[in-house]
């Protein structure tokens, strides 16, 4: 069964998991090679933020208690809960991703490292910070980077040109109206997926194979490009900031990734721990 991202993610109380978790999921083993690399990448990212004076904020439970959206599973880090000058490593799961499980870069459990730099950092400085982290701290190849945004990001043209990522070559500009109506997070992001508040983003994509085409010219990019993070560059719903997918960054750095099934056991185990004996979120049923 194919699940539509905008409809299925609203999965609510019609599904019931009960207290029994699938034994196959609980027994699934992790890809040891990937997990070792993942832990290293995550610690390097923590160290990079720590060296800048940023404090790590505690993650929120993966179960939200709100069954009306994403079946009660947390789908993104909470912008309103993260103070400036801080970062968070937030575990997440998206019901709609079940329909995309054939993609090697989609996992049932993943972690977003969200960061709100100090208030004195503007969007230009935040953009430089993100690209410095990726190309210097993690030595990602600039030739394999591309960005996706909307025309409002034109203000970042001088910044990208200055750091050697020419705006005219590296940025896919979506039609603003189409991006707004799609509500798919690429160009505009809605913290409350059913609300009206939004902010403007630049999505950062990375080509997963060394040999390949230059930065794509249209959205969505080809399948060999994966989104590894995004930069908040405008909007009242969040200050300038950035987020990085820890698993996607590990994939970009190492070329290794766990399979869907290998991460499925971790999802059920984390939800079970977070539920503390209570009925797990209804959305977990979609992952069985």
Image: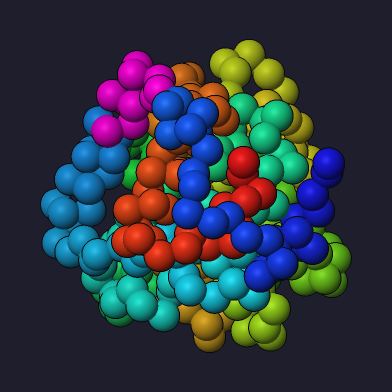
> Can you say whether 270 is above or below 74 in the image?
above
Tell me if residue 77 can be seen.
no
Choose between 126 and 81: the one closer to the eye.
Answer: 81
Q: Is residue 193 visible?
A: yes
Q: Is residue 61 left or right of residue 183?
A: left
Residue found at the far top of this picture: 211
Q: Main secondary structure of the magenta part?
A: helix
Residue at 77% in and 71% down: 180
Residue at 18%, 64% (x, y): give it: 55
Between 30 and 167, which is closer to the camera in this rendering? 30
**Which part of the image, by quadrant, shows the N terminus?**
top right
Residue nearest the observer in this picture, 136 or 184? 184
Residue 187 image point, x, y percent: 67, 62
**In which quadrant is the C terminus drawn?**
top right
Is 138 rendered above or below residue 194?
Answer: above
* The stretch drawn in magenta includes residue 32: yes
Q: Nearer the viewer, residue 122 or 271?
A: 271
In the rendered image, residue 215, in percent from the top left (x then y), is placed at 68, 34
- Quarter assignment of residue 70: bottom right
Q: Position of residue 249 (x, y in %)?
A: 43, 36
Q: Residue at x 48, y 74 (%)?
A: 65
What residue appears at the point 67 percent right and 31 percent down from the top-left corner?
Answer: 103
Q: Image height check: is 10 above or below 252?
A: below
Magenta span has 73?
no
Work out whether 193 lies above or below 106.
Answer: below
The span picked out in magenta is: 29-39
- Which of the 4 image quarters holds residue 223? top right
């Amino acid at each position: 069964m194919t699940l539509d991202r905008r409809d299925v993610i609203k999965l609510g109380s019609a599904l019931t998991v009960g207290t029994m978790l699938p034994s196959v999921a609980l027994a699934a083993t992790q890809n040891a090679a990937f997990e070792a690399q993942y832990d290293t990448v995550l610690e390097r990212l923590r160290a990079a933020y720590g060296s800048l004076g940023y404090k790590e904020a505690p993650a929120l439970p993966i179960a939200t208690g709100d069954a009306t959206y994403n079946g009660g599973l947390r789908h993104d880090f909470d912008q309103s809960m993260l103070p400036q000058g801080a970062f968070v490593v937030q575990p997440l799961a998206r019901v709609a991703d079940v329909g995309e499980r054939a993609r090697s870069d989609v996992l049932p459990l993943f972690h977003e490292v969200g960061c709100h730099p100090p208030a004195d950092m503007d969007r230009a400085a935040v953009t430089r910070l993100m690209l410095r982290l990726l190309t210097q701290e993690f030595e990602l190849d600039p030739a394999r980077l591309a960005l996706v945004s909307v025309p409002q990001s034109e203000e970042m043209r001088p910044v990208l040109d200055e750091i050697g990522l020419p705006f005219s070559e590296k940025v896919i500009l979506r039609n603003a109206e189409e991006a707004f109506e799609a509500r798919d997070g690429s160009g505009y992001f809605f913290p409350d997926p059913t609300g009206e508040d939004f902010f403007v983003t630049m999505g950062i994509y990375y080509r997963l194979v060394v040999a390949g085409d230059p930065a794509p010219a249209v959205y969505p990019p080809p399948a060999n490009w994966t989104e590894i993070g995004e930069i908040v560059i405008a909007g009242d719903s969040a200050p300038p900031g950035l987020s990085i997918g820890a698993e996607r960054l590990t994939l970009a750095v190492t070329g290794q990734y766990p399979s869907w099934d290998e991460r499925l056991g971790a999802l059920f185990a984390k939800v079970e721990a977070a539920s503390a004996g209570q009925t797990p979120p209804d959305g977990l049923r979609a992952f069985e």
